[in-house]
Image (cartoon, rainbow, N blue to C red):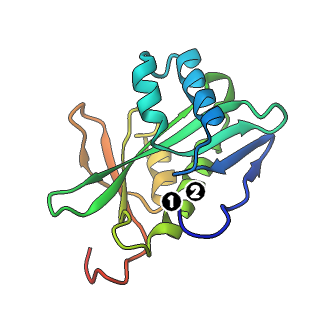
Amino acid sequence: MAAGNPPAPAKLDGYAVRWVFGQLAPHRRQAVVAFWLRERAIASPDEAWRRAWEVACVLEDALSGDVVGVCTVAIGFDDTQRSYGYVRIYIGKAHRHPGLGVRMMRRMIRGFEALATEPGAPRRLIAGIENRKIERRGGMRLLAGLGFVSIGKTAEGGELVERTLTSHPDRSTL
């Protein structure tokens, strides 16, 4: 995490999105793992625990504080050994309201753009679209509005999208 205070949570119609990348407290990590297992989003407790270390943002019910959605970003390296973030979002079935996914993505993007000037930080975000509804024209328009462009297909045949983050001062080209 960059030096300074973490950004304040963004309230969204009864929900709060909290930026937690690199600073997920043990109690919140346990809540994320329990959420994924309860929702059957991730079947294995071992995999859920491993993925909890990749959490960038959590979506919480503003009244109860319960975790109801998670955005993870796994940091990887491309063929040129430059880092990128692989984005995944899961929102609990009872909380899938229009606009929440986009709002989580906006918060995650802002968080990574704040880190983008650090040497070695990811310079782009990639997401494989696993929800066929999002691959439709309207979903792709929403992603385009967030700065994502289609770059091909995943191994499973889904859409693969990418978004460039703020340029690094130590890198002249993307």
Question: Crowding at label 2, few (<14), some or many (≥20) Cα neighbours within 10 Å?
Answer: few
Residue at the left extreme?
79
The secondary structure type at the circle numbered 2 is helix
In front here: 158 or 11? 11
In front here: 159 or 117? 117
Is there any visible trace of residue 131 in the rendered image?
no
Q: Counting residues from the N terminus, which is met first, the one under dot 2 or under dot 1? A: 2
The secondary structure type at the circle numbered 1 is loop
Question: Crowding at label 1, few (<14), some or many (≥20) Cα neighbours within 10 Å?
Answer: some
Residue 49 locus on image (x, y percent): 46, 28
Residue 14 locus on image (x, y percent): 81, 40
Which one is in front in this view, the residue at disc 2 or the one at disc 1? 2
Q: Give residue 173's quadrant in the image.
A: bottom left
Residue 16 locus on image (x, y percent): 73, 45
Residue at image position (68%, 62%) is 7
Residue at image position (49%, 62%) is 112
Query: On the rendered structure, is 69 left or right of 61?
Result: left
Q: Where does label 2 land, which residue?
A: 106
Mark pair 2, 1: CA separation: 7 Å
Residue at image position (21%, 56%) is 78
Q: Amino acid at mark 1?
A: Leu
Q: Where does label 1 land, which residue?
A: 146
Residue 145 locus on image (x, y percent): 51, 60
Q: Amino acid at mark 2?
A: Arg
